[in-house]
Structure formats: C-alpha cells, structure tokens
Amino acid sequence: MTCSAFAAGCADRSVPQAQLPELDATNPLLAEWTTPHATPPFSQIRLEHYEPAFDAAIACSRAEVEVIVKNPAAPTFGNTIVALERQGALLDRISGIFYNLLEADATDEMQAIALRVQPKLTELSNDISLDPELFARVKAVYEHPGLGLTKEEKKLLENTYRSFARNGAALSDADKERYRQYTSELSALTLQFGQNTLAATNAFTLNITDPKRVAELPAFVREGMAAEAKARGEKGWTVTLQAPSYVPFLTYSSDRELKEKLWRAYNSRALGGENDNTEVMKKIANTRLKIANLLGYKCYADYVLERRMAKDTPTVAAFLQELLDETKEYADQDYRTVSDYAAAHGFEGDLMPWDWAYYSQKYRDEKYALNDEVVKPYFQLEKVKNGVFMLANKLYGLNFTPNGQIETYHPEVTAYDVTDEKGRFMAVLYLDFFPRATKRSGAWMTEFRGAKIVDGEETRPLVSLVMNFTKPTEETPSLLTFDEVETFLHEFGHSLHGMLGEGHYESMTGTSVYRDFVELPSQIMENWATEKEFLDLWAAHYQTGEPIPAEIVDRIVAAKNYLAAYGNVRQLSFGMTDMAWHTITEPMEGDAVAFERESMASTQILPVVEGTAMGPSFGHIFSGGYAAGYYGYKWAEVLEADAFSLFKEKGIFDRGVATAFRKHVLSKGGTEDPMQLYVRFRGHKPETKALIEKMGIGKEK
C-alpha cells in the first residue's frame, strides 16, 4: 500500500498521488488493520517495528507535503489547507501508539528509541512550518479564502495560518535556522526532563522489616505495602514514591523519622544526583525564551497566552492574584487550625510538611468522622466504574460494552465499545487503572486516534484513560479513596470530551481546544462525587452490599471543603511558579531552587524545607503541555463552578442541561472560540465568585 491510503481526503482530486512511496506491509504499524474499529494490533507490534515505521511515515509526510507545494493549480482551501490537515495521518497513527505507550508502559528500549526519533520529528515539523513555498500557498488562501467556507472551515484556515506564523514561517532565513536549532534543543530537553523524573521516582523505595513500625497502619495500607515488597522480592513492607503508596503512608503513619525520609525523597526527586533536572529546567526555560524572542514576543508566556482564553499575561497574573487575595488568610487559618489540633494532641514545635497529611487527616476524622477506612469499602473500583458509566448514560445516553476482541497493550487494560442511545458507535474506551514501574505517575486521558470525517466517512476516536489507583491485594479488591473517585470522574470528563467530539478535522475535535478550556469538561464531572442522589445509585459496601449510608454521604459533603483554602493556595503556588519561569525576559542563570522559592513566597503556608524543590519534577510545565498554562486548572474551576450551578438549579441528571453542555461544549472541540461556546451554554461569562462560593470560603465549616 502507499501513503495515499492514510492521506486520503484532499478536496482537490487533481492532486497527484504517484510520488507517494510504497510501504512495507510486513510492518504492522504500516499495514492495513482489519481489527475491530481499526484498533491497534498491539500483540503484533514489536520494538524493532517502531523506528522503521517512523522513518517510513516521515518520508510519507514529506512526500505528501511536496505534492501540495508542487501542485500547479492555484492555492485553494481544498488543495492546500485541507491537504495539509490530512497529510501525516500515518505518522499520527504511529506516534499515537508509541508516545502513549511511552507514558503508560515504557521500557528502557522505548526511551532510547524516543531519544533517536524525536530529533527526526522535530526536523520534519520545522521543515514543514518553515517551508517558504508552502507558507506562500497558505498565506494566499488566508488572504483570499474565497466564498462559502463554513464556520468550521474558517477556523481551520485561521488555525493553519497562525500555526505557520507562530512556528517561524515569517522569519528570515537566518532566523529560521536559529528557530530550528532552538526547537530541536527544546524537544530533546523536555524528553530528557521526563525521563529523569521517571528514573528518580523509581530509584527510591523504603523497605520496612520491623512490624512495630507498620502496626498502626490501616489494613489496606499494610496489604499494599506487603504486596509491593513481595513483587520486589523483599521482606516486610515497601513504600515507593508512587502516589497510591506514598500518600497513604504519610497520611496514616505517626513515624516522623520514616515520613521525613520519604517526604524529602519525594520532594527532592531529580534535584541533584544522576537524574538531576535543575540545569535541564533552566535550559528549557531559557530556550523557550529564545524562541519567544525570535518570534517577536517579550517572554514565552506572551507567546503561549495569545492562543488561550485568558489572551495575555496581565490577565493571568491578575486572575491568580485575585484568587490569592481572596483565600490566603483562610489558607493560613487552615494551617493554624491543624497546627493547634496537633499541639492539643501532644505535638511540639512547628508542624512540618511531612506531618501535615497525618494531622490534617486526624482532624478531619474527628470533626467529620470520615476517613479512608470508613469510605473505601463503599468505593470498590468495579462499582465506581459502573457508577461513572451510569452517569454518562443518564446525562448523554452512552452505553459501555466490554469488547474482548479488541487487543490491549497490557493484560491489566480493558477495552469497551461506546455507543449512544440510538446504537451509534461513538468510540473505543481503554481503561488502565494500576501503577507499574513502566508507567509514569499521575492520571491522564489520551487518544490513539481522534475523530474526523473524510469524504463523508467518519472515523471515531480511540480513547484511553490511564490511572494509578490502589491495586487489589490477595485479600481485598481495589478500593478507592474519595480522592481517587474524584480523579476517575475528572479523567472520565476528558474522555467524554474526546468520545463526544464531532467534526471533519481531527486537529479541532475532542480535546483539541485551548489549554485553559480543556479542564472544564473534566473538572465539572468531579461535582457528582459529592452528590447523594448519584452516590445512592451505586455506592455499596463491597462485602455486605449495604448501600452507602446517608450519614456517610452527608459527611463527605460536609468535609468536601475542608482545607479548601489551603488546597486553593497550593494550586496557586504551582501556577505562580509556572508563570515566573515563563515570564523571564533575560536568561535565567541563577539558582533554580532559590528562583522557585521567590516565585512561591507569597503563597507559602507550610515551613520551607532546605534541600527540596518541586520544579525538578514538575513535569506539567517542563515536559508536559502546561508551560505558562498551569493557571488553567484554576481558570477551569471557575468555569466549572459556574457551569455546574446550572445542573444544581435544574437537576444533576437534567438531560436538557446535559444536552446543551454536549452541544455547545463537548461536541464542538476547538471549532469555535471557547468563550463564545461557554457563553452560549451558560448565558453569561464566568466570574471568580462562583468558585469562592463553591469552596465555602469564609463560612463556618
């Protein structure tokens, strides 16, 4: 077969296809798939297939672009803009598999492949965006688009032109070479940052052999630690820096010596040593500044925010400061409340960060009679999953059917056919729940393939949810904490955004939206976690089958805003340090840790601990997509607080509100300006007061 099988869909059929190379069909990444819904045949794909497939796909993409550039016909929306959108489909397919598995099931060999492949991809991207003939065709269409373009087509045209302009197309030849150099360096640096962080996270474990030091821990914590030790061939109990292991130990252990050791290890990941990221993060920030300056921007944040809801740096700075001013005194009071509680129970001295989880949990248990041991039995993972599916059915009419014919990339992963109430196939959903050494920490939604329509034929998305939930043990099934339930709902909200996306162009469907808008569909879903009407439908004790008691639901609701101000300011600290790194106007040559301390000083609540820093493992901004964008989490909280108030007013399962949210937000992707979409749904622009009210700031709790 040829590349044209993947590049199909150009509106102008006079475009020649003969120049497109033949592909090696013996490589499963390059062959046609006859699998259900054209899902990846994971069992056939081996490590040695990736690099040849990348090389072939890159050659395909170059050939497809060459066809566009050399087309003798005058530039049109079809033969230039749509053709550019469609080119690279094979490369998208391969990248969608490789880079998703690099996050969820990586090996040393895959990381080595990534280091070799990434420069080639960066070179290709630069060759396309910096091609003067190609940009001339795009510019010709942009300046003279012709008549009859739909709103979706106009947005694609605008996006295409701006993408070229923002990626150096209008630079001089000399500056284009500098742009190539900087982007290549940045690509390598961000990849190295992520690999250092993963290695540092996996490098530390804490093995405990004295039963007295774990006796006080809840059974589920001990069992998880014992299972970890057994899997590693160790005796006793083992704690790792993975959240399902690290967080429960800090929360339930009173052993300050071990907790300090664990906390310091977690908060000094990639800070010094063989996996040091301190110089890497400075180089990343400085390289981003060079790129921004080259493109005519004062700082990298100015460059990023031009294509965000917030629009500019002063707006973000004012937004973060407004939330800080509204909540800092209450956050300080949260710290005093927990400190006073600890002192009343015999604690002496300053409450340190490694003490915080233990005493804040004890205070919460006493005030609200609520802890993980009380809640977890009602949140068996299988029941939570069924509850989340039920919610999607009530709101959007979706059905989830396990499909054992769909191959998965790991035995722990399950795949579902997703259909709507009329039987229309909407997506494949992969669920990957548990931690492993080959998976990075955290939780995320991703896609192996997005939605699009080519020549009237629709392709539906392949969506994956990847978590790091508490593993089942030999004695106990996987039981989730309330935070994990919220995480499930959050990531599932992202998946709804992907699964319900509609449109012709994959670059604008699903979650392909402005970064500060993408968290609205996810964060709004968290609201249902504290709705009694929802929990009563499925939350039952995993042993007795007893429905979750009303009093526990009431306590969950009452405890929801416990330490809300503290949590808010903590998030603001992340947003502010992100903005500090990306508003530098001169290269940062000083101490990275001192720079971070200064950037977070106004948000500091807990005592500062020497020898620790967040930045060296802050993957969101240094190796993820949140550079100059971490504020988006709080921005989206304002959006979702205002949006969910409509569900509260009309009913949490109201199909009218859900239908409007689907029509104006979930299905639209990036086809329109997000503020216009939001206002169309809600009827007005969001205000920060909605979030302040939701957190109960200033109210008696």
Image (cartoon, grey):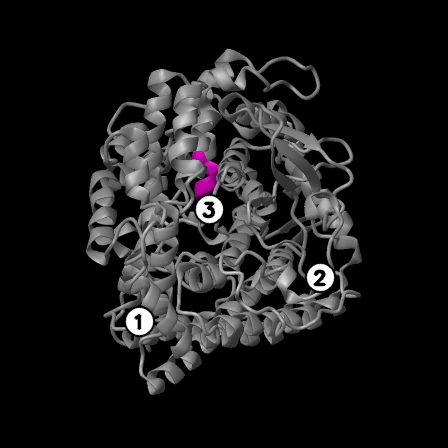
**At which x and y percent is residue 410?**
73, 49
Please say whether residue 623 is visible from this viewpoint. no
Segment tinted magenta in the rendering = 354-360
- Figure quadrant of residue 92: bottom right
Contact, CB < 8 Å: mark 1 with mark 3? no
Which of 666/265 is in front? 666
Q: Residues within 10 Å of mark 1 (few under 14, many from 20)?
A: many
Q: Amino acid under label 2?
A: Leu
Disc number lying in front (1 or 3): 3
Query: Which tag, 1 or 3, sits closer to the chain's start?
Result: 1
Look at the image and say whether residue 54 sits in the magenta stretch. Answer: no
Look at discs 1 and 2 and give the one toward the viewer: 2
Q: Secondary structure at mark 3?
A: loop
Task: Check disc 1 and report its element: helix, strand or loop.
Answer: helix
How far apart, in angstroms, are the residues tagged by discs 3 and 2? 25 Å
Q: Which residue is mark 2?
A: 29
Task: Identify the main secondary structure in magenta.
Answer: helix
**Residue 50 falls left or right of residue 685:** right
Which residue is painted at 54% across and 39% down in the image? 499
- Position of 466 relative to 529 (above/below): below
Location of residue 360 (image quadrant): top left
Disc 1 residue type (three-letter): Ala
Instruction: Pick whichever, 596 or 674, lies toward us.
Output: 674
Residue placed at 60% from the left, 22% from the top? 378
To which residue does mark 1 refer?
292
Quadrant containing the N terminus in the rendered view: bottom right
Q: Is residue 698 above or below residue 233?
A: above
* Residue type marked 3: Thr
